[in-house]
Amino acid sequence: MAEIVGRAGVVGGGIGGLAATIALRGAGWDVTVYEQAPRFAEVGAGITLAANALTALDVLGVGESVRAAGVADRRGLARNQRGRVLVDAKVSDFVGGLIALHRADLIAILAAAVPSECVRAGSRVVGVDAEGRIETDAGTIQYDLVVGADGVNSVVRQQLWPEAGAVRRTGMTAWRWVLDTSAPDPVGVILGERAEAGVVPMAGDRTYVFTAARPGISTLEYFADWPDPLPKLIAGTDPARVVVDELLEIPVPKRLWKDRVALIGDAAHAMRPTLGQGAAMALEDAVTLAACAPDLGRYSAARRRRVATMSFLSQHGTRFTSPGSGTLAALRDAMFAATPNALSIKMFRLVNDRALRGWRPPTR
Ligand SMILES: Cc1cc2nc3c(=O)[nH]c(=O)nc-3n(C[C@H](O)[C@H](O)[C@H](O)COP(=O)(O)OP(=O)(O)OC[C@H]3O[C@@H](n4cnc5c(N)ncnc54)[C@H](O)[C@@H]3O)c2cc1C
């Protein structure tokens, strides 16, 4: 049997924590993952995974299963709130490699790659120290490495990074849900004045719908006069299936490690979903951590600038997707109108290929 590198405790069994568990086990660590919920689960919504997320999932050995559960190639429109087409493209032409799937399917695939003896479900972590001790109701256990993957309200971050700053409330609201019917045309995104929306086909004849709105907009009725098929999709939805969240973000700490503890995912850098990169960053963190551990300084150096940049772009990207005024939205739309469709696609593809498709984890 291969020699064990050390013992690792992962706090949180979401996308980031499960990915870190798989990656660290692959690197020879003996891993235990603590999840406060009685079983691994996700909210009832879809998720889009960009090329970098899929590269990380390939490193974990589950990329093909995730691709098989998702929908990749399709035509999509970017329109404005009045229905004017801003960009008309095949998704593969402009954000090559992006797929959409149900969050529950993603979690199920990740969880299936974690042996049950590694899992402490229904186990809430109440304390962590920099020397690697994890405390739950059942007692305290010492680890060589602790991974804080416990999401935006992270206990690990609050206890060990008190200087990093509090969770920032953006005042923006997001609504997301899945319909058990196939997506009606036209699918794609709608960029409004004070909100945005998306209609995304999913496998199994299902449709993922998301909307996000600036402060002051508190109901889905705001979208009643938006372009088809959005109003119909809203009207045909059981409100009980809609997941509603205020968007939260956190300032990225200067260092993503302290002694034996590393932060990953939303615990380190929860960001607005403007670019659809939160989970992708958590997956990148997980495989990078496994390549670097136990050298957590190397992990932090490999990740800090990238996640801070993505967080910054996600924060300021909302000025573009929902600028907050009719004048600013008209300026954005005029910019699209002045740019030929083929050029818009080429520019998006260039950025996507360099920033996302080109990402590779460091070697061990
Ligand atoms: C509206 C919206 C849309 C989004 N869309 C996308 C998208 O399309 N693509 C994308 O890449 N990203 C997207 N994201 C971001 C993505 O959802 C998150 O970045 C990702 O889920 C973070 O995963 P995580 O594992 O770090 O944290 P979480 O998913 O928050 O997981 C943390 C886990 O830790 C557990 N936990 C918490 N505290 C404790 C404790 N004390 N003890 C034990 N367990 C604990 C929780 O129960 C949870 O299971 C979106 C986010 C939002 C809000």
Image: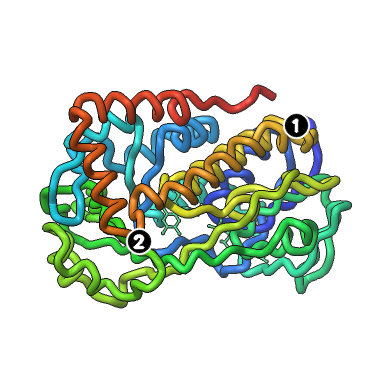
Q: Picture coordinates of residue 216 (x, y %)?
A: 38, 73
Residue tagged 2:
212
Mark 2 sits near ligand 1, with its Cβ under 8 Å away: yes
Q: Is residue 4 visible?
A: no
The residue at 16%/53% (across/down) is 183
Which of disc 1 and disc 2 is earlier in sequence? 2
Q: Picture coordinates of residue 134 (x, y %)?
A: 80, 60
Quadrant assignment, res 81:
bottom left
Question: Where does the N terminus fall, quadrant-wise?
Answer: top right
Q: Picture coordinates of residue 331 (x, y %)?
A: 27, 45
The residue at 11%/49% (across/down) is 185
Would you place residue 294 above or below residue 69 in this image? above
Would you place residue 193 above or below residue 320 in this image? below
Q: Amino acid at mark 1?
A: Arg
Q: Which residue occupies the foreground of this view, 320 or 96?
A: 320
Residue tagged 1:
298
The residue at 43%/27% (across/down) is 357
Q: Secondary structure at mark 1?
A: helix
Q: Which residue occupies the foreground of this view, 303 or 344?
A: 344
Q: Amino acid at mark 2?
A: Ala
Question: Where does the C terminus fall, quadrant-wise?
Answer: top right
Q: Residue furthest right?
A: 131
Q: Is residue 74 visible?
A: yes
Would you place residue 309 above or below residue 361 in this image? below
How busy is the neighbourhood of tag 2: few (under 14 within 10 Å), some, or many (20 plus)? Answer: many
